[in-house]
Image: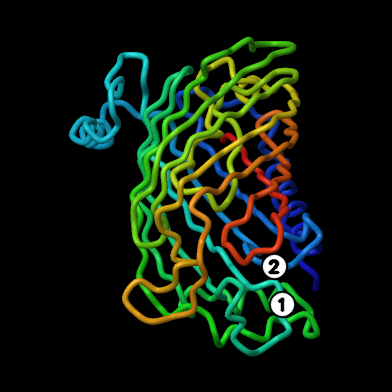
Amino acid sequence: MTVQKHILSCILIFLALLAPSAVQAVSFEDGRVFEAIQDNDWFGGDDRWNTNDVRIAYISAPIEQDAAARISDDISWLSLPLWESSEFFRRWTFAGSQSMFTPASTSNPDLIEDDRPYAGWLNIALGLNKQSRRQLDALELTMGVVGPWALGEEAQNFIHTEDQESKGWDNQLRNEPGFMLAWQRYLRVTDWSGPGWGFDAIPHFGGVAGNVYTFANAGLELRAGQNLPSDFGSSLAWQVGHSGTTAPTTPDDPRLNGRYGWHVFAVADGRYMAHNIFLDGNTWRDSHSVDKEEWVADLSVGAALLIRRVKVTYTHTMRTKEFTQQPEVQWFGSVNLSVVF
């Protein structure tokens, strides 16, 4: 079965499961979010490099007087100024994801020294967000494994027919535990939204530190459409520290009131990459590696549809070259399905 059939099947199953509950009202105080995201290079017309990312996330309802509030008070120094404010509320986030990376030629069983290594990355993440209508601070700890234990070979070959299977997974990065601590801040600096037509601008900045990725990033998203959600925009499956961006921030979010909506958007995100294990190779063992580009950018456009409590988003992304031997930019698409319940 081809990857596009798997993607379509997942979309149909997800929407079928949501259909009975999507018409029921939900209060802001009880609003939780389930989110499923897939990035795949099939949408870009190729099967190479950052070939697939899948992420499933749960975002809790707003919480105030419990352990999460006390913990966030204890770690407020990690989130820079404005962490404490009466306007803010907190949410827990839980996520699991898998990523797969391959060279451009997957039919060659030999090591391809001038192309990126084969690699898999399987992980779970726990986050604590503090947000208001205007601001989101996201702190996330990610733990997982790189290498054969991440099941990248099994996952990739499962979604390809036998004659499309990748032959070079024997050359993948070796098993290594992975850890990352990520922090991101989102700001809604322009907010002409509400019932009817709207526009907003959402800059973000932050960073990640760990043996998988270490980078600093900044970017901007612009959205325009009808009945804009009161969230912090779009996210891709691979992104670290971005869980919680799709959660409502106000009771007038159209998903909480059974309204329909749509919007288009454009996103730019730039990163200074100090470390990328999927290009630099294993941390403590010799492995295949290539010379990475230190400055990398994602430029994306997309559209989102709100169907009562369901949000369906498609994002098309151009990523600049990630390593010096890479002959051209990479294109990939992302499908994001989320529901407030």
Query: Where, by quadrant of the figure, is residue 165 drawn?
Result: bottom right
- Identify which residue, 242 or 96, lies in the foreground: 242
Residue drawn at x 46%, y 40% as measured from the top left = 217
| Residue 142 position in % (x across, y down) | 38, 55
Could you tell me which quadrant the C terminus lies in? Answer: top right
Quick check: 145 left or right of 266? left
- Identify which residue, 148 or 214, lies in the foreground: 214
Residue drawn at x 40%, y 74% as measured from the top left = 282
| Residue 195 position in % (x across, y down) | 69, 11
Q: Residues within 10 Å of mark 2 (few under 14, many from 20)?
A: many
Query: Where, by quadrant of the figure, is residue 283 drawn?
Result: bottom left
| 78 relative to 29, above or below | below
Could you tell me which quadrant the N terminus lies in? Answer: bottom right
| 288 relative to 232, above or below | below
Element type at mark 2 = loop
Decide which of tag 2 and tag 1 comes sooner along the chain.
Answer: 2
Checking the image for residue 48, the label placed there is: 2
What amino acid is labelled 2 in the image? Arg
What amino acid is labelled 1 in the image? Ser
Q: Residues within 10 Å of mark 1 (few under 14, many from 20)?
A: some
- How many tags in the picture? 2
- Identify which residue, 88 or 298, lies in the foreground: 298
Query: What's the CA distance linking mark 2 and mark 1?
Result: 7 Å
Task: Confirm or deny contact between disc 2 and disc 1 (CB under 8 A).
Answer: yes
For disc 1, the marked residue is: 105
| Residue 322 position in % (x across, y down) | 58, 57
Element type at mark 1 = loop
Residue drawn at x 52%, y 26% as measured from the top left = 203
| Residue 93 position in % (x across, y down) | 42, 43
Taking the view exactly as shown, the residue that stands out farthest to the left is 74
Checking the image for residue 3, the label placed there is: none
